[in-house]
Image: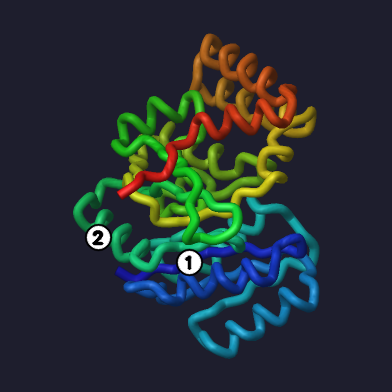
Amino acid sequence: MQFSVLMSVHDADDPIFFDAAIDSITSQTVCPDEIVLVKDGCLGSDLERVVKKWEMRLKDRLSVVTLEASKGLGEALRVGTEHCKYELVARMDADDVSVPDRFEKQIAFLKINPDIDVVGSWIGEFSKSPEEVISHRATPVQPEDVRRYARFRNPVNHPSVMLKKKPLHAVGGYLPFPGFEDYYLWARLLMRGHKIANIPEVLVKQRISHQFYKRRGGWTYVMQELSLQRELLRMGFINRRVYLANIVFRIIVRFMPLSIRRQIYKGLRIKPMTS
């Protein structure tokens, strides 16, 4: 099965992490047939050097799409998807690391489960080295569990997904929805009867810093969440009772002291398993 990898990079990304992210997807047991990289606005010289390095190494396998001004993740992914040649598209963030057999396992899963349109995985979170995972972000596995869970929380780890373009286009593709472009997409897919599943293994490792918890507080983040919840209610994806429960919980958490909010997030994670 041929597939594309879709990445977006912007000026705030770290060049070292960006380089490691691309390296992890070019060192797979099953390598992508193409990588579509969207430059979301002007990049600094260090990031541009990384782009040039991989253009030289990958040649025709790397397609670079340039947005003159930063448009945000939703628009960058919408444009990038249009440039993907293949029906299967895997997502990858510019600072994460895919484990070596990620794509092999996702393709094998989709071959066995042809009715699944999006497959994600669990994520291993780390702060210093990908080899030192501090927690796992688990997600529901079976499609029916994903559908139920999605009424309350995002059911998929976005950087881990491999998805099919046809159902993506059928619901309008990625759309701008700051902070929640992925969650909004999953809700629209589920509303149309498309199936989403997760592989209960860590196939992507994600960097977590102090800023991760800080960004998830304050009025800006609350207003983004409330906008999403109102849209989910309007769509009929959630009912009013779930809507009210969701916004009350979110408002409380967003205005808690950072130290308490960090503990709540950590409590929702699974500690790494010991051998």
How would you rate the neighbour count of disc 2 (Cα within 10 Å): few for under 14, some for 14-19, many for 20 or more? few
Amino acid under disc 1: Val
Rendered location of residue 16, percent (x, y) = 65, 71
Look at the image and tell me in which quarter the N terminus lies: bottom left
The image quarter containing residue 93 is: bottom right
- Relative to 176, is 229 above or below? above
Q: Quadrant of residue 141?
A: top left
SS label for mark 1: strand
In this view, 7 is above or below 270: below
Residue 271 higher or lower than 24, as above or below: above
Q: Position of residue 241 (x, y in %)?
A: 53, 9
Residue sitting farthest toward the front = 275
| Left or right of 93 in this view: 142 | left
On the image, numbered disc 2 is attached to which residue? 108
The image's mark for residue 5 is 1
Most extreme residue toward the top, as rendered?
Answer: 241
Q: Is residue 169 visible?
A: no
When asked about the image quadrant of residue 256, the answer is top right
User: Where residue 248 appears, x then y in whole percent?
Assistant: 64, 14
Q: CA distance from mark 2 to mark 1?
A: 17 Å
Q: Residue at x 23, y 58 (%)?
A: 111
The residue shown at (52%, 64%) is 6
Point 54% across, 53% down: residue = 206
Q: Nearer the viewer, residue 206 or 44?
A: 206
Q: From what the image shows, is residue 269 above or below residue 166?
A: above
Left or right side of 191 for 173: right
